[in-house]
């Protein structure tokens, strides 16, 4: 979990994956990798936005996302509560969702 005061779309578990060239070309993508969504928690901002297990995040707030570090860098406290676009690939098709990031819950000791 992120420290309090940092926006999040999680609880989402994800990992960086390559995007096949044929899929990138078909969707006119400028990225060759994205964040594969392994799981989405039921009541999370990601679930409310319609993000699903198996989606690949390729953009956040009109900025390319090629790895989990990119996504974490873009999730700032300033984004908390502000509707933000998130670009994804689902079944090799490009989609755009609107997500409202929330403050990360405090980590329990």
Image (cartoon, rainbow, N blue to C red):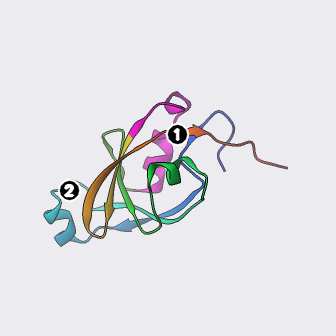
Q: Dot 1 surroundings within 10 Å: few (below 14), some, or many (20 or more)?
A: many
* Residue 94 lies in quadrant: bottom left
Q: What residue does disc 2 label?
A: 29
Whole-percent x and y of residue 53?
Answer: 47, 67
- Outermost residue toward the right in this view: 109
The location of residue 88, given as percent across then percent down, is 34, 56
Residue sitting at x 17%, y 71%: 22
What range is drawn magenta here?
A: 67-84
Please give left or right for residue 53 compared with residue 107 in the image: left
Label 1 sits on a secondary structure element that is loop
Gap between marks 2 and 1 measured at Cα: 24 Å
Q: Position of residue 85 (x, y in %)?
A: 36, 41
In the foreground, 100 or 7: 100
Q: Is residue 89 above or below residue 107?
A: below
Residue 60: name its quadrant.
Answer: top left
Provide residue 9's location: percent of width, then percent of height.
Answer: 53, 47
Please say whether residue 69 is one of the residues in the magenta stretch. yes
Q: Which residue is the extreme one toward the top? A: 78
Mark 2–mark 1 CB contact (< 8 Å): no
Labels 2 and 1: the sequence-earlier one: 2
Residue drawn at (36%, 50%) of the image = 65
Left or right of 62 on screen, residue 24 = left
Query: What number is the disc on residue 101?
Result: 1
């Amino acid at each position: 979990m992120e420290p309090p005061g940092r926006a999040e779309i999680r609880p989402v578990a994800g990992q960086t994956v390559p995007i096949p060239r044929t899929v990138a070309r078909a969707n006119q993508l400028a990225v060759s990798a994205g964040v594969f969504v392994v799981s989405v928690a039921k009541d999370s901002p990601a679930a409310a936005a319609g993000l699903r297990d198996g989606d690949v995040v390729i953009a956040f707030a009109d900025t390319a996302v090629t790895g989990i570090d990119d996504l974490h860098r873009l999730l700032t406290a300033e984004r908390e509560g502000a509707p933000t676009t998130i670009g994804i690939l689902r079944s090799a098709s490009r989609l755009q969702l609107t997500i409202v990031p929330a403050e990360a819950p405090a980590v329990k000791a």
